[in-house]
Image: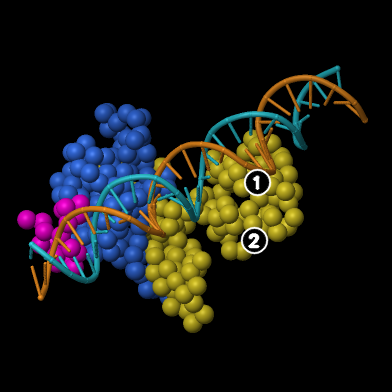
Chain colours: A blue, B yellow, C cyan, D orange
Amino acid sequence: MESSELRKVGLKVTLPRMKILEILETAEPRHMSAEDVYKILLEAGEEIGLATVYRVLTQFEAAGLVTRHHFEGGHSVFEMNQGHHHDHIVCNQCGKVVEFIDETIERCQEKVARKAGFTIRDHSLIIYGDCNRKDCPNLKS
Amino acid sequence: MESSELRKVGLKVTLPRMKILEILETAEPRHMSAEDVYKILLEAGEEIGLATVYRVLTQFEAAGLVTRHHFEGGHSVFEMNQGHHHDHIVCNQCGKVVEFIDETIERCQEKVARKAGFTIRDHSLIIYGDCNRKDCPNLKS
DNA sequence: TTCTTGATGCGAAAGCTTCTCATCCCTGTT
DNA sequence: AACAGGGATGAGAAGCTTTCGCATCAAGAA
């Protein structure tokens, strides 16, 4: 039962929040825009407003349940947190997203920030490229 | 004479392009939004449209003269290319931007992408933090 | 069940960026 | 130097993502 997750972070357990949480936990791909989540809810016959989706996702982000990434094109994508940080490789052609974590890169970032006198709060590393798969069409979403 | 730079990349030499190029080459800070460039032009008494600034910056990007970065908050900043790639540390408080380059990180990215079967076209690494300077107010732009 | 407060849905609005189109001005050619 | 052609420009409208405002509604406590 996911309701405990909501209570744990101090959010009232409401229908929209449960539905959105469920989608984030089960749907594929795991990286979705607010619009994506909204469409899934509409197709499922839910009565929900796009504004609510944005509000809830923002609250989830503040609560540490999801992470928001600023991909190119001026729109954000959200993904469920899995406890461990990771970065992304995005295919320019098909939009496929691969997650990765590289400890060496993480350590180098700490070193660089320290040298500049900064305290790291967050970071965003996104590699853009071509995935080179045979089934990768140019039907960029 | 900057006009040669424009000709070199196959762009007609026009007044707006010259002016924008000059601002990008001389103004501080080196990271500016389209709006920033537009305001500088207006204050200089130029008759120019915001749409033109966006058009020209996009053309400059396509021509490899400038690079566009997607910072948080949904707005882009542009900076003149200096021949060498670099990444950024941005202060959450005052917006100060520090550039850095770390060869180890660059190499790791290549390795990670290769392992995932991707061909890197581009990448974006932005570290967000606090710059810890005494003159760093919370007057986030 | 009733009450209080916070959550929701809807439409409007804000912020950034792009589009449309009539006019203008580079640029190569007379 | 004047000309012609097509790309470039300015102004406003429009598009897109995201947020706001407010009347209504529902979750959680008494």
Instruction: Kindly indicate the quadrant of the structure image that contains residue B132.
Output: bottom left
Disc number for residue B49? 1
Q: Is the residue B133 above or below the residue B30 in the image?
A: below
Q: Secondary structure at mark 2?
A: loop
Give the label, 2 or 1, closer to the camera.
1
User: In the depicted view, which residue is nearer to us: A123 or A61?
Assistant: A61
Mark 1: few, some, or many residues within 10 Å (few <14, many ≥20)?
Answer: few
In the rendered structure, the residue with mark 1 lies on which chain? Answer: B
In the rendered structure, the residue with mark 2 lies on which chain? Answer: B
Give percent across and percent down for residue C10.
33, 45
Instruction: Kindly indicate the quadrant of the structure image that contains residue A27.
Output: top left
State the residue at coordinates (19%, 64%).
A11
Query: Which residue is the site of mark 2?
Result: B27
Q: Secondary structure at mark 1?
A: loop
Would you say B120 lies left or right of D3 here? left
Q: Which residues are magenta?
A: A1-18
